[in-house]
Image (spheres, rainbow, N blue to C red):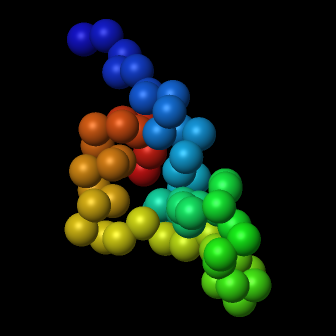
């Protein structure tokens, strides 16, 4: 059986933590920032974890070698 290819778009968007959870960046940080409050923009800077209901699908379909 041939090796599975990793979806490179997903590999750039998600990182695996040491405990096996997926880390992602928050959206809404690229443009139209004038109407967003400073507090909201500051909170959007920090990464967060992918929801556990979706993370298994992301790992198996998009990142096949993520353990």
Q: Residue at x 65, y 75 (%)?
A: 35
- Indicate the position of residue 37 as horizontal and vertical percent values: 69, 85
Q: Is residue 11 above or below residue 42?
A: above
Nearest to the observer: residue 51 or residue 35: 35
The quarter of the picture where the N terminus appears is top left
- Indicate the position of residue 34 as horizontal and vertical percent values: 72, 71
Q: Residue at x 41, y 39 (%)?
A: 63
- Indicate the position of residue 15 as horizontal and vertical percent values: 57, 53
Judged left or right of residue 41, residue 14 is left
- Indicate the position of residue 18 as horizontal and vertical percent values: 58, 64
Q: Residue at x 42, y 50 (%)?
A: 67
Q: Residue at x 55, y 72 (%)?
A: 48
Q: Is residue 35 above or below residue 62?
A: below
Q: Is any atom of residue 17 visible in this view?
A: no
Judged left or right of residue 19, residue 29 is right
Q: Is residue 26 above or below residue 4?
A: below
Q: Is residue 44 above or below residue 61?
A: below
Judged left or right of residue 36, residue 28 is left
Judged left or right of residue 46, residue 65 is left
Q: Is any atom of residue 66 visible in this view?
A: yes
> Seen from this angle, which residue lies furthest bottom?
39
Nearest to the observer: residue 2 or residue 61: 61
> Seen from this angle, which residue lies furthest top?
2
Give residue 41's quadrant in the image. Answer: bottom right
């Amino acid at each position: 059986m041939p090796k599975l290819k990793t979806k490179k778009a997903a590999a750039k968007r998600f990182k695996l933590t040491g405990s096996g959870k997926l880390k992602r960046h928050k959206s809404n940080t690229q443009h139209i920032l004038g109407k967003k409050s400073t507090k909201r923009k500051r909170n959007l800077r920090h990464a967060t974890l992918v929801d556990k209901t979706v993370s298994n699908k992301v790992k198996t379909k998009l990142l096949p070698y993520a353990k």
